[in-house]
Amino acid sequence: MKKARTREGYGLLSGIIGIFLNFLLFASKFVVGLVIGSVAVVADAFNNLADATSSVVTIIGFKLSAKPADKEHPFGHGRLEEVAGFIIAMTMIFVGIEFSRASISNIITPEPLYFSWIAVGILLFGFFVKLWMFFFNRRLGKKISSNALLNVAADARIDCVISAFTVAAIFITHLFDVYIDGFAGLAVSLFILYQGYSSAKQSISAILGSPPDPETVLAIEEIILAHAEVLGVHDLTVHNYGAHKNIATIHVEVDEKLTLQECSKISEEICGWVLEKLGIALTVHFDPSQKTNAGGANFEP
């Protein structure tokens, strides 16, 4: 429960900061985009507005995912965090599609672009704000193993590229009198679409149930095989139901002469080790075997 509260607190912190900073960037970029007539800056502004909306979804997702298990959801509500991530991704895709259309229209019928140092300054300010948000959310995401926060960090990194690209487009148009604002807006839209697609794919994979990473599989097998009575393991399955809710089953080979009581003791030991070391609730199915012991030694985490 304490871990769930801590996780919810990190999600709330990230969400509140995201709402404030992204709305600040949206307001400033939207005004500047209208003043200088840049579809790329306006697209970037609405991308920040979508990020602010995503921060609201992040807060709601962390709040709901922290709810304890109930009769309808015996494994808890942890995967709601991934649902929140999917909603964020779909918002990004919607914004990308809308501004792709606006950018193509601007390419066909160009509008005059007015150079402004204030506009450049605001875009550079946005670049450094997003750079800070990238490192901040990545650190939190790694600390609590949250795909949702890592997606927010990845989005901030893409926003840094977008801001830099938009500034370059403004300078090129001003210095060389070559109109590329519509193309810059289209590039921004494509960045947004790519990030939305990548985030949606990752969230859907987690919701459907992705296979465990090789490091986790190896760690489980090493802990179990370290027991003196274990002769082999196979058919490991790991299910993830959100943060700190991992359930696994595995077939363990033991000497066919062991009694039921002895197998029960072995099960308690290795399940306790796996839970303590990896936080995974393990269920063991024993298979009698005529193998000889490969030289395991009692393991104490």
Image: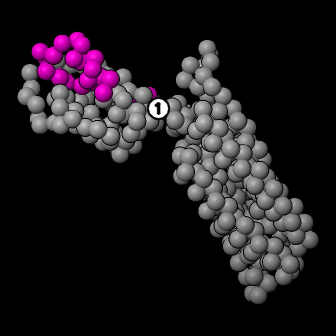
Q: Where residue 101 appears, x then y in whole percent? A: 76, 55
- Under mark 1, the amino acid is Asn
Residue 86, quarter of the rendered image: top right
Q: Residue 288, relative to residue 30: is it above or below?
A: above
Who's the residue at 83% across and 69% down the image? Answer: 38
At label 1, counting other C-alpha atoms closer than 10 Å, the crowd grade (few under 14, some 14-19, many 20 or more) is some
Q: Is residue 42 magenta?
A: no
Question: According to the image, what is the colour scheme of the structure?
Answer: one colour
Per the image, label 1 sits on a secondary structure element best described as: strand
Who's the residue at 77% across and 50% down the image? Answer: 16
Q: Where residue 111 appears, x then y in whole percent? A: 86, 70
Residue 294, quarter of the rendered image: top left
| Left or right side of 246 for 3 | right
Q: Residue furthest bottom?
A: 175
Of the pair 276 and 90, the residue shown nearer to us: 276
Of the pair 214 and 281, the residue shown nearer to us: 281
Of the pair 150 and 256, the residue shown nearer to us: 256
Q: Residue 206, relative to residue 150: is it above or below?
A: above
Q: Where residue 266 appears, x then y in whole percent? A: 26, 23
Q: Where residue 231 appears, x then y in whole percent? A: 16, 29
User: The C terminus is located in which quarter?
Assistant: top left
Residue, disc 1: 246
Q: Residue 24, relative to residue 212: is it above or below?
A: below
Whether residue 198 appears in this view of the structure is no
Q: Residue 280, relative to residue 139: is it above or below?
A: above
Who's the residue at 7% across and 28% down the image? Answer: 292
User: The N terminus is located in which quarter?
Assistant: top right
Whether residue 123 appears in this view of the structure is yes
Residue 179, quarter of the rendered image: bottom right
The magenta span reads 246-269
